[in-house]
Image: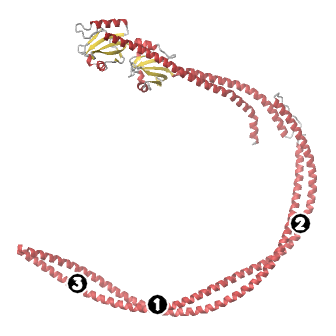
Amino acid sequence: MHKAQSQIKSVSIRLYLLITIAMLAIIPVVILGIISTTTSRRSNEKSFDENRILLTNIGQEIINNKITYYEDTLKTLIENNDFNIEQSPYSKLNGDMKLIKKTDESILNIYYSDNTGKVFQILDSKLPDDYNATEKPWFKETIENPNKYIIHSPYQDKITGKSAITIYKAVIKNNVPIGVMAIDVELSELADQLSSVKYGQTGEFIITDKDGVVISDNDKTKIAGTEPTEYNCWNEISTGDKGKIKFNYNNSTYEGYFETSELTGWKLILKIPSSELRKSENDSTIASIIIIFAIAAITLIITMAIARRISKGVNALKDGMERTANGEFNKEIIINNHIREFIILENSFNKMQKNIAKLIKSVDNSAINVNKNAINSANMSKEVAISMNQVSETINQISSGTMESSSNLEMIAHSMDLLSQSMNKIEEATESVNGMAIKANDLGKDGIKIVKTVINKSYETKKSTESVKDVVSEVSESIMKIGAMNKAISAITEQTNLLALNAAIEAARAGEAGKGFAVVADEIRKLAEETSVSAKQIDEIIKEIRNKSELAVDRVLETSGTVDDQEHAVKESEVIFTEIVTAIESLTEKVSKIAEGVSTINNMKDDVVEKVENLSAILEETASGTEEVSATAQEVTASTESFVDNFNNLKDMAEELKEKIEEFKL
């Protein structure tokens, strides 16, 4: 434990200085870097919000201006032409359309279709003969929404091969749509204008319709394509009006903003790579890290220099303490350090070392005196201990004799107690035996009465058994008579059954006249059969009763024999009970005499016990006094022996202290 503490102290100051100063220097810089990075991020986000609003508004304005311009062109053509003229009706319209196309190279075609499906256009290309515009979706949608401008999704123009959109407007006369005016517009000029709107180095605008078809992109090859629908945020763009977005595409991460054009329903998507958007944040973070490492390096160098200087002073102080711990008090420590605290430590330690040296010298002188006094006291204590041992031996002899006499008396008293207990038990036993004898005498007399009652009952039982035997014999004879009568009934039943059979045969011969008689004969036959069955059952029952009555006669005869034996045994029991009662009366007289003798012994025992107890009490008091004197003598002897041991220990300690003091270099 001490070694571990020494190791900690040997490195603690330098380590603590390095950690403390480094933390004090680095933590504020880290906090400043975090604040700087956070501020940069917030500033960057604020700048992005401001710029995306500005750029989105510019994009909205470009689209609105372009679409509004072509919507106004369609409106002018419709308002400046009369579509009701029958003779050469569209000559003026044709001239106006050609004039407008010459003034704007973005216009690919202008055409009009009436309700018959005919198309009038400025291009020389001829449509198929069976072409009917009224069947086309764009015509139907425009007619269904006569007051709205319908903008077709971007497509590849078949004639020029350029990306284009078409704007439709219904021609209304007398509040009835009579046709559709349309203008095909190339998207390259619109795309050029929107591509000039950029954010940063690589940020760009993408314009799509509501289905994700590209209207404008810096890469012209993507126009009329559907790349934005592959963004993982397209569902959010297609269903929302505006909002911030973040998505991955082609192994790159993009952030941006989208907004929906109120005029066209197109989606304006501003996207910029996250790496460019967060570049300033990353630069700020890298700068903060560089500053932190630079400050940490400078702090480490300065701290190590300070720690080395302080460590020298601490090591000098440590060496001085180790010399002092080894008993060297004759060398002062010298700390070559101009730090005020170290100078104070140097002076205080040297002063402490001198004071300890003086104290050790004083202790050395005291140890010599203690050693001399301890030797004298030890000799005196030995003489006292010898005298007290002699006194203690004499007292022990007196105490031993007293204790032996007391012990003998205690044995006598104990024997008398045992005798008293035995006599009490004998007295209790005699009382118990006397009570049991009286009870046995009463029970014997009761037994004689019961035996006489049993004799009377046995005589009555014998008479009843003979009556039962006579009754069972009579029942057996009656059953024999019933059996004979049952056989007669069975014979009559058989004859009745035979007569009923003959009657049935005669009735059958009589034909219709004998049917009633046949029914009666049949009933008689059934009754005879049932009677025969019952007679058989009665015969079986009679046999069973006869067997049981015979068995009952046998049991009655056996019971009669048992009753005779019982009567003989009861008479013998009466003789025995009479003898028992006589013996118990004799026992009661003898037990009474024993109780009188026990009572006399108890009275004599009490006098003896009282005298023995008085003598024992006197001897115990004498023994107690001698024991107390002996104990006091032993305590004095032990104390003197303890004094001797303590004085010897004190002498040894004084000598040991002197040896230890001699180890110091004063």
Q: Residues within 10 Å of mark 1 (few under 14, many from 20)?
A: some
Q: Is residue 364 above or below residue 240?
A: below
Query: Does residue 276 show up?
Result: no
Instruction: State whether residue 37 is above or below residue 664.
Output: above
| Residue beneath disc 1 | 454
Residue sitting nearer the eye, 3 or 643: 643
Residue picked out by circle 3: 486
617 and 641: which is toward the camera: 617
| Callout 2: SS | helix
Disc 1 and disc 3: Cα gap in Å?
46 Å
Q: Which image quarter is the N terminus in? A: top right
Residue that label 2 marks: 389
Of circles 2 and 1, the one toward us is 1
Q: Residue furthest front?
A: 174
In the image, taking residue 135 as reference, residue 325 lies left or right, namely: right
**Amino acid beneath label 2:** Asn
- Marks 1 & 3, CB-CB < 8 Å contact: no
Image location (x, y in percent) of residue 168: 33, 16
Say whether marks 2 and 1 touch (CB < 8 Å): no
Query: Which quadrant would residue 546 be assigned to in this image?
Result: bottom left
**Image position of 70 (left or right of 46):** left
- Name the secondary structure under disc 1: helix
Q: Position of residue 7 (x, y in %)?
A: 75, 37
Q: Amino acid at mark 3?
A: Asn
Q: Could you say where residue 532 lies in the image, as x and y percent from the top left?
A: 20, 79
Relative to 69, does residue 253 appear above or below in the rendering?
below
Mark 2 or 1, nearer chain start: 2
| Among the two numbered marks 1 and 3 on one chain, the one whose residue lies closer to the N terminus | 1
Crowd band around label 2 with a 10 angstrom C-alpha radius: few (<14), some (14–19), many (20+): some
